[in-house]
Image: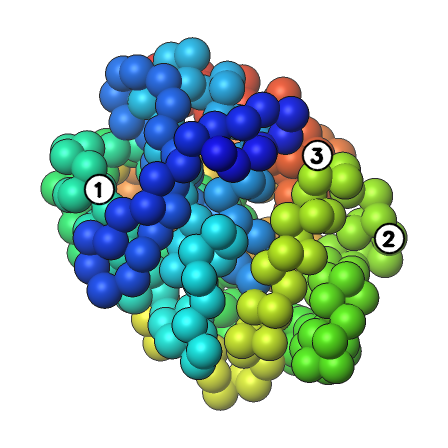
Amino acid sequence: MLTIGDRQYKFHHIQPGNVPLAYIEHGHGAPVVFVHGSGPTDLRTWERQIEPFAAHFRVIAYSRRCHYPNSATGDLAGITSTRSHARDLSDLIVALGLGRAHLIGFSFGADIVLRLAADRPDLVRTLTITEPPLRSWLATLPGGAELLAQRAAAILPAKRAVQNGDLEQGARLFIDGLMGRGVFDGLPPSARQRIVSNAHLIGAEPTEIDAVSAEDITRDEAATIQAPTLLLTGDASPPMFLIVSRELARVLPNVEQARISGAAHLLHITHAQVCNAIVLGFLCKG
């Protein structure tokens, strides 16, 4: 059993490709697959979404390769590869016989579902994406290179703390460095716990500008995505996410936008009720 919030769920392991993936399944109806973000997180980040969405849909929430409760390979192979994670996701969808699924991706998880939508449109019913980093896009936008450099400077102390064995401090420095001082300590205890349990993955976060992902979808690929898409942002989110989201909204052909007042990057945690209502309304149309 896996404790998520104040509930326990039976979780399963599946190895559709070359890596094991842990997932939970809850509810009935059209499939909805939740894809979590990068670094120190896992399927438990959706604790405030599982029950509300399972009342209407068949919910699949999985932990990406190397994230809790999956075992982490020694070299963290593929942990920063958008294409590897997109292949894992497509393998999961096919292995579970989901057909065309509603895909919900947060942050780097949004990069992953966009890559899947470009590569395997036959597996996608709708997309819900929250503030994808798309670092290769950011690097080309006005002020983007400076924001990437600031991100790298913010992450380096977190990586050093993790390398020195202080996982909690590494998690705090990572979250606060990206989202603002005090954000980590202001999160619910369950959120802080799961971040710390994955903090070792912070060591794999890229910090060199020349390591900007070459596996992001291109603007030309984004323009081919026909699936109805909901793009969520928070009006208090870091500029790097808002700049990229604005550019993505310009390129995607079938997109609607929702901006949540007072929310920052972790809007599905801090503004769950509002976020859930918006997304469920969108999914019920598709």
Check disc 3 and report its element: helix, strand or loop: helix
Q: What residue sits right under mark 3 in the picture?
A: 270
Residue located 20% across and 53% down the image = 16
Residue located 20% across and 59% down the image = 17
Q: Position of residue 186 (x, y in %)?
A: 83, 43
| Mark 1 neighbour density, 10 Å: few (under 14) some (14–19) many (20 or more) | many
Work out whether mark 3 precedes mark 2 in sequence or the reverse, and give the earlier one: 2
42 lies above or below 83: above
Cβ atoms at labels 1 and 3 below 8 Å apart: no
Q: CA distance from mark 1 to mark 3?
A: 29 Å
Q: What residue sits right under mark 2 in the picture?
A: 182
Q: Amino acid at mark 2?
A: Gly
Check disc 1 and report its element: helix, strand or loop: helix
Q: Position of residue 192 (x, y in %)?
A: 73, 48
Give the quadrant of residue 255. top left
148 left or right of 213 in image = right
Q: Amino acid at mark 1?
A: Ile
254 left or right of 4 in image = left
Work out whether mark 1 precedes mark 3 in sequence or the reverse, and give the earlier one: 1
Q: What residue sits right under mark 1 in the picture?
A: 93
Q: CA distance from mark 2 to mark 1?
A: 38 Å
Work out whether mark 2 precedes mark 1 in sequence or the reverse, and give the earlier one: 1
Q: Nearer the viewer, residue 256 or 276?
A: 276
